[in-house]
Image (cartoon, helix red, strand yellow):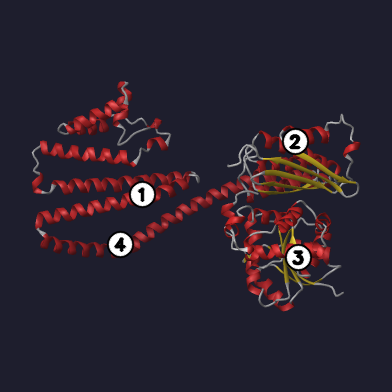
Amino acid sequence: MTRLRLVLVDDHAMFRAGVRAELGDDFDIVGEAANVDEAIRVIRETTPDVVLLDVHLPGGDARAVLEGCLSDVPATRFLALSVSDAPDDVVATVRGGARGYVTKAISGPELREAIQRTADGDAVFSPRLAGFVLDAFAGGAAEHDEEIDRLTPREREVMRLIARGYTYREVATELVLSIKTVETHVSAVLRKLQLSNRRELAQWASDRKLI
Amino acid sequence: MTGRVVAGVAIGLAEHLHLPVWVARVAFVVLTLAGGVGLVLYVAFWAVLPLNTEAATDPAAARSSDTTRLLSLIVIVVGIGLLLAALGVDFARGAVLPLLIAIVGAALIWRQTDDEQRDAWSAAASKAARQTVDTSAAAGRWRIAVGIALVVFALVALLVSQTGPAAALQGLSAALLILGGVALVTFPWIYRLLREQNEQRRALIRAEERADIAAHVHDSVLQTLTLIQHASGDPHEVARLARTEERALRSWLYAPDGDPDRTFAAALKRDAAEIESAYDATIELVTVGDTDLDPALSALVAAAREAMVNAAQHGGHEASVYAEVDDAVVEVFVRDHGSGFDLESIPTDRHGVRESIIRRMERNGGSATVRSSPGVGTEIHLCLPRMSDVTP
């Protein structure tokens, strides 16, 4: 199997060096960038498999990077990486086109797994992102007729288990499903998160002062 | 002055004479209608009596409703009219009525700008006041519009009554031309003045925010960094300090609100933070929804705290906590990847899990289930039906 090619986008050189040291053995890190313009240029030049994208960057945020090059590199997947817990940051980045979101506190093996999963085209949900989704899609199913605006009971179950700290494998065991099915459910939720017009998603920050 | 309607003379007088306020008010109204004497008295008292500003602490009480104000305004106008009539002024000549109307309009505008000035000051002093300005702004604009309409109407009426319609039209157009010219000449100057004022206000807010951040950084971040330098030989302590500070900074940056004594999610968050630093553990807490605490929910938080302590002690220093509040039920899951334990093997007299988690939940109408398998970890599921507020 060929090694995955990565680009790191983060304005802290120290953090990039850390990730490089952590992942260098398993992945080809083909480029680094510290701001939005540089990121767009490097990603276009190298067309990596996966971009590790910091949410907050000088000269814009992750969304600016996604808008700048998403259409030029259709095969590249983006995984958001952030210290921020603010729901609006996270949701905005995922709605901008990122395939998932993990916090920088993530451990090395978990990060490797998340990158592999992103490269495979699956969605990566941290417990916190699952919590955000459950919060955003909470209640009011009756007032949202559109299928895209609500979660199925199964999807809700999967999200709750992820929020409880279960890995995909553990979710699969718990619900007696295959891992592939769990991944399908999570990807469906990601699609809803990206495409839904729920008011809660649009103006999250002002709506929810919790968490 | 608390409870004042116009200038607070009636209430001041009533306080002084130990009479109910309404007696003083009725007296003023009656005297005003009786040839305007009441108005003269009122103005005289207003000019002479000292202002008791200490009582003006409650802005809500100091502001009477608009209708009361309007009524008193009408009484004043009628009083002035009667007074002028008593002095022999002839209303038929037409100059008096428009003037009175103009005075009312001007008074409205003056009062409003006065209020706005005060609101602007208090808004600069405290951010909380900004909302009050927003809510009263709409009413304020109406008042100013009515005031301007009254003044313009009165002036036009005066002009027409004095010179006749044709000459009035000529005069009006001349006046409009002059006004337009003046506006054109002074516009850049006024615009700059407004902009400068805005700039100043923004600078003030920025300075306040910077002071806020500086105070916070000093109180927490710098202190922690100093502590870390002192403890540099002890990696556990350094990690603990860093984690505590990270949590504090995070909650300050992203969710400054939420009172741990009042809401469920904030209480859980506080307990998780305390256990993290006490047991040198990492607790990933995810909450969905929130509600106000009640005794049963406080018991749930206490049970969750026990479960977290248990996970932090025996669960390999890592735990996931998920809490969900919905309309029917509040649930908390506390999960660790420790060695696990067998509930049956715990002696019945041991306080831990049995008493402080399971019994506590049962006493409050809830339930607790423990799922534990050796090698995989433990998950404690706390569940509390919400009975008290089905319709919140």
Pointer 4 or 2: first along the chain: 4
The image quarter containing residue B87 is top left
Can I make out residue B113 in this image? yes
- The amino acid on which the numbered mark 4 sits, given as a three-letter code, is Thr
Q: CA distance from mark 2 to mark 3?
A: 37 Å
The N terminus of chain B sits in image quarter: top left
Q: Report how far apart the C-alphas of labels 3 and 4 lie in the structure.
A: 67 Å
Q: Are marks 1 and 3 on the same chain?
A: no
Give me the residue at 21% from left, 65% from top.
B177
Q: Secondary structure at mark 2?
A: helix
Can marks 3 and 4 be said to lie on one chain?
no
Q: Report x, y in % for residue A25.
A: 86, 67
Q: Residues within 10 Å of mark 3 (few under 14, many from 20)?
A: some
Mark 4 / mark 1, whichever is N-terminal: 1
Instruction: Tell me where residue B364 appears, x and y as whole percent.
Output: 71, 34
Left or right placement of residue B368 versus residue B172 in this view: right
- CA gap between label 2 and label 1 equals 54 Å
Q: Which mark is residue B140?
A: 1
User: What secondary structure is marked by label 4?
Assistant: helix
Q: Against B262, is A93 above or below?
A: below
Q: CA distance from mark 4 to mark 1?
A: 25 Å
Q: Kindly identify the amino acid type of the residue bearing the numbered disc 3.
A: Thr
Q: Nearer the viewer, residue B41 or B356?
A: B356
Tell me the residue that label 3 is attached to: A184
Residue corresponding to mark 2: B361
Kindly indicate whether the residues beneath marks 2 and 1 are on one polypeptide chain.
yes
Reading the image, the residue beneath label 4 is B186
